[in-house]
Amino acid sequence: MLRLQVSERSAPMAQDKGITPAAGKAPMGNLIVVKATWDPEAGVFVAESDDVPGLVTEAESIEELKKKLPGIIQDLLDTNEAEGEIEVPIEIVAHASLRVRVPRAA
């Protein structure tokens, strides 16, 4: 059984830390980086991860995404290799852009 620990940040990707995903499957016990990008037309964050093949989901908020990810990742990861329980940390890297109109200086 997997225990997933979710954190979030809005900074550079995990590659900046030298974290490299295993080819074709998530690194068991290693950090899983989920990239969430705001889609203004749909009004949701779209989340994907190179560390978990097939992971694509959306949520209206980061909090909602944090609730959804553990179940989705548990379903997608092949856990038949290990017996017992391991903890898999998940880091959400979020990106959103906004524009605001301000009056011009006179």
Image (cartoon, grey):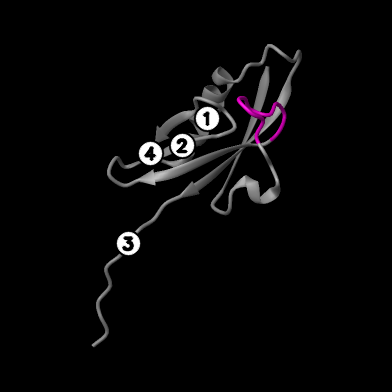
SS at mark 2 in the image: strand
Quarter of the picture holding the N terminus? top right
Q: Nearer the viewer, residue 79 or 66?
A: 79
Label 2 sits on what residue type? Ala
From the viewer's perspective, is residue 7 above or below residue 87?
A: below
Contact (Cβ within 8 Å) of mark 2 with mark 1: yes
Among the 4 quarters of the image, the one containing residue 25: top right
Checking the image for residue 69, the label placed there is 1
Checking the image for residue 47, the label placed there is 2
Nearest-to-viewer mark from 2 and 1: 2
Checking the image for residue 99, the label placed there is 3
Contact (Cβ within 8 Å) of mark 2 with mark 3: no
Among the 4 quarters of the image, the one containing residue 70: top right
Circle 4 Cα neighbour tier, 10 Å, few/some/many (<14 / 14–19 / ≥20):
some
Q: Nearer the viewer, residue 91 or 3?
A: 91
SS at mark 4 in the image: loop
State the image coordinates of residue 102 (x, y, percent, origin top left): 28, 72
SS at mark 1 in the image: helix
**Chain part drawn in magenta:** 21-30
Residue farthest bottom in this picture:
106
Circle 3 Cα neighbour tier, 10 Å, few/some/many (<14 / 14–19 / ≥20):
few
On the image, numbered disc 4 is attached to which residue? 60
State the image coordinates of residue 48 (x, y, percent, origin top left): 49, 35
The disc, 2 or 3, on the residue closer to the chain's N-terminal end is 2
Circle 2 Cα neighbour tier, 10 Å, few/some/many (<14 / 14–19 / ≥20):
many
The disc, 1 or 4, on the residue closer to the chain's N-terminal end is 4
CA separation, marks 3 and 1? Answer: 29 Å
Residue under the image location 50 percent in, 28 percent down: 55
CA separation, marks 4 and 2? Answer: 11 Å
